[in-house]
Image (cartoon, rainbow, N blue to C red):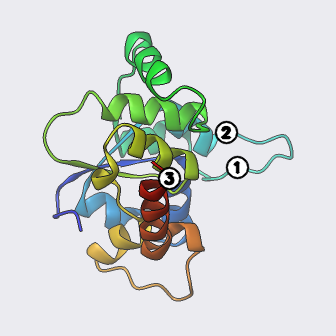
């Protein structure tokens, strides 16, 4: 479990889930939340059918995060290192590229198969944290079961599966 005030990188779906479950502010106050511009864009843009993952302005959401810079060299290096072995969207790719520029202690909450696979390939699995663990660490109590891929059980099972496949 990340200690309070740790750096935690959040992807688009972690941002969405925190808003959906009403624990965004608690997580934001307990940890130093970092992300990248692409994840904020993905969370706040309208889809083809007009739905939006997080009903907030891009500017307001970005103001509550430390947005990491991602340059082409770091992104290209990441792409070359993991190749097509991990199916990442642009936000996940940029978030992992940014993560590789950090030093010290940090955690990443990205409940996605491709992210877990890429983190294994980069020998960074121990930096992953489930959304459930983050929410519980700041005292949030769930009123209903959370989707499986946001749970600690999902992350634990998926990490184990990745390690056996390597």
In this rendering, the label closer to the viewer, 2 or 3: 3
The residue nearer to you, when weighing 116 against 10, is 116
In contact (CB < 8 Å): disc 1 and disc 2? yes
Earlier sequence position, callout 1 versus callout 2: 2
Q: How many marks?
A: 3
The residue under the point 59% across, 45% down is: 43
Residue designated by label 3: 165
Q: Which residue is identified by label 2?
A: 45
- Dot 2 lies on which element? loop
Q: Residue at x 56, y 67 (%)?
A: 149
**SS type, badge 3:** helix
| Label 2 to label 3: alpha-carbon separation | 36 Å
Q: Position of residue 125 (x, y in %)?
A: 34, 51
Residue 110 is situated, as x and y percent measured from the top left of the image, at: 47, 52
Q: Which mark is residue 52?
A: 1
Find the distance from the CA under tag 3 to the CA under tag 1. 36 Å
| Residue 9 badge | none
């Amino acid at each position: 479990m990340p200690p309070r005030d740790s750096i935690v990188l959040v992807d688009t779906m972690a941002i969405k889930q925190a808003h959906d479950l009403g624990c965004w502010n608690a997580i934001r106050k307990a940890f130093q939340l970092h992300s990248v511009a692409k994840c904020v864009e993905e969370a706040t843009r309208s889809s083809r059918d007009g739905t939006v993952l997080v009903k907030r302005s891009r500017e307001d959401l970005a103001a509550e995060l430390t947005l990491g810079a991602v340059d082409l060299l770091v992104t290209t290096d990441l792409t070359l290192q993991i190749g097509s072995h991990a199916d990442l969207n642009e936000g996940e790719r940029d978030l992992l590229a940014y993560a590789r520029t950090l030093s010290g202690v940090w955690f990443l909450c990205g409940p996605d198969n491709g992210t877990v696979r890429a983190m294994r390939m980069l020998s960074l699995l121990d930096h992953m944290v489930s959304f459930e663990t983050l929410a519980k660490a700041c005292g949030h109590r769930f009123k209903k079961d959370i989707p499986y891929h946001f749970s600690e059980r999902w992350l634990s099972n998926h990490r184990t599966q990745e390690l056996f496949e390597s």
